[in-house]
Image: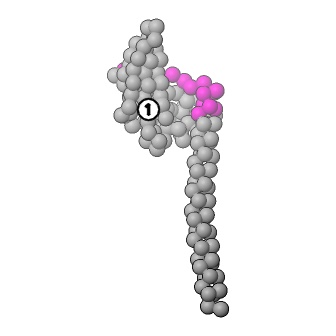
Amino acid sequence: MTSIYCGAGNIHHVGVKVMTPDGSFAETPTSKDSYETSDMNEKIEKADYKLGEDGNVIEFLNLNKDKNIRVEFIGDRRYTTTMSPTDRQAVAGVYELSKILSAMQQIKKEQEDANLKIGFINKKKERKAMEEAAEE
């Protein structure tokens, strides 16, 4: 997951907290991989989180995609904004797609394992047939 902040001044963000109106929230741990730059006086900051190390923020956003969600960028200063419905739906769509792709990878791995076992059994059957033919 990547969080991106753009604004007039740097906040040096290294994490995000997402909150619903009822007070429930999820928060990333401090990012170990952040980057800052600027473009035409606009400050741009990016913080990356490894797969599975996002503090369940993506899953939280997926579960709460129909609620107003505030995003707080955490750094030297804090900046809070509200996610648009389109952004919430996009996150949920990407989350669902990632689940499907992970399931497909798992199926492919299981298929490869099954094919190896089938190959082993077929070779064993061939050896047995050759041994029986040699005995005759």
Q: Percent position (x, y) of residue 53?
A: 43, 41
Q: Is residue 86 found inside the magenta-colored segment of the image?
A: yes
Q: Residue at x 63, y 73 (%)?
A: 122
Q: Is residue 124 visible?
A: yes
Q: Along the line of sight, which residue is nearer the eye, 30 or 82?
A: 30
For the view shown, which residue lies furthest in the top direction? 40
Q: In the rendered image, which quarter contains the C terminus? A: bottom right
Write the start and end of the magenta stretch as one range: 77-91
Q: Percent position (x, y) of residue 114?
A: 60, 64
Q: Along the line of sight, which residue is nearer the eye, 116 or 32?
A: 116
For the view shown, which residue lies furthest in the bottom direction? 136
Q: Is residue 64 left or right of residue 16?
A: right
Q: Percent position (x, y) of residue 117?
A: 58, 68
- Residue pointed to by mark 1: 48
Please say if 12 is above or below 38.
below
Q: Residue at x 46, y 11 (%)?
A: 39
Please say if 106 is above or below 35.
below
Q: Residue at x 34, y 22 (%)?
A: 76
Please state which amino acid type lies under the numbered disc 1: Asp
For the view shown, which residue lies furthest in the left direction? 76
Q: Percent position (x, y) of residue 36?
A: 39, 20
